[in-house]
Image (spheres, helix red, strand yellow):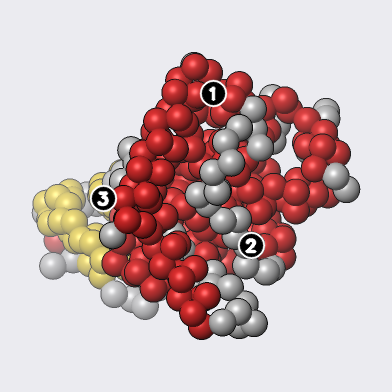
Amino acid sequence: MTDEPPIFETLEPPPGGLVGLRQKLEPRPRAWAVKALPLALIAAALVALFVVPALTHRAPRTLVIQYTAAAPSAEQSAELDAQIALLDLNGRTRSQETVSVRADQASTTQVTAVFESSKTSFYLVAALSWP
Amino acid sequence: MSAKAASADARSSGLDEAALHRLYVDKEKALYNVVYRWVWNAEEAQDVVQEAFVKLWAARSRIDPSTVEPYLYRTALNLASNRRRRNKLWRWLGLEALDESPSGAQSAEHTLAAEQRRLRVREAVERLTEKQRRVVLLAEFSGLSYGDIALTLGVPEGTVASRRNSALQKLRQLLAGEDDD
């Protein structure tokens, strides 16, 4: 070994090093939350854009409505266009079909209409009317 | 607890939190002195040392207990090196580097001389290559053997010796040249 003086002096670290280490070793939920927030927002946006529509989308269903009504007496032998409508609970017409009906001698006739609807739950009432 | 006991704790079968704390108390000063010569800022150096221990804690199950100390030094050096490259440390190095001023009991003349000496050492250290700096600082402060320094840096033991010698020679030349001015 040489007798040359040391090049480096030994420095004392700032106080509180162990306390700082302990703090860093503690779980930091806030930091995790901050890191996770953008991911959560992106995930929520993706869910809203793609997942929810995919899950809630219903293919149109075929809805067969049969309605029995009294045929108009004046035109019992005529072939008529009858209109059958689907109404919602508020009485609004949500869908309407025109059906060709042959009214025979009977006092009633049966009209069958086919609707395509993806929201069948709204349609609870069917109504038939003669034009 | 002695330094050997703390290291033995770390090398034992498991590193629990108490052992980690003891290891920190034992190794903080040496690590700090190595890292400080990398970042030249007291708070930054302490932060790097703490981060190295946090990484050690996170990786404790994967680390061979016999290599805890080389792992610590390697991690601390890499963290310090990354910070130095990444952030804008260079911009606020100047006066920050002097923040380990000696106590006020010393005379102003002595303080000034000491600070000038530190600045000269710092400038000389900055003129070493990164490889030389790693070796000379580890050899100076870590207390690791050449073998452990070689393990820390992933170089042959002979390379550690030659780099240390060349680094010390360069430092002495630089400091002697400036002292002559």
Q: Is residue A80 left or right of residue B176?
A: left
The x, y position of residue A69, in whole percent, is 32, 60
| Residue at horizontal 17 percent and vertical 52 percent from the top | A99
Q: Is residue B133 left or right of residue A26?
A: left
Mark carried by residue B150: 1
Chain identifier of the residue bearing label 2 in the image: A
| Residue at horizontal 58 percent and vertical 73 percent from the top | B102
For the question of whether residue A107 can be seen, the reply is no
Marks 3 and 2 belong to one chain: yes
Pointer 3 and pointer 2: residues touching (CB < 8 Å)? no
Q: Secondary structure at mark 1?
A: helix
Marks 2 and 1 belong to one chain: no
| Residue at horizontal 85 percent and vertical 45 percent from the top | B2
Pointer 3 and pointer 1: residues touching (CB < 8 Å)? no
Give the answer, above or below, for where B133 lies relative to A32. above
Q: CA distance from mark 2 to mark 1?
A: 26 Å
Residue count near mark 1 (Cα–Cα under 10 Å), binned few <14, some 14–19, many ≥20: some
Marks 3 and 1 belong to one chain: no
Q: CA distance from mark 3 to mark 1?
A: 82 Å
Q: Identify the residue position indicated by label 2 in the image.
A: A12
Give the answer, above or below, for where A80 lies relative to B9. below
* Of marks 3 and 2, the one in the foreground: 2
Q: Quadrant of the C terminus of chain B?
A: bottom left
Q: Identify the residue position indicated by label 3 in the image.
A: A115
Mark carried by residue A79: none
Q: Amino acid at mark 3?
A: Phe
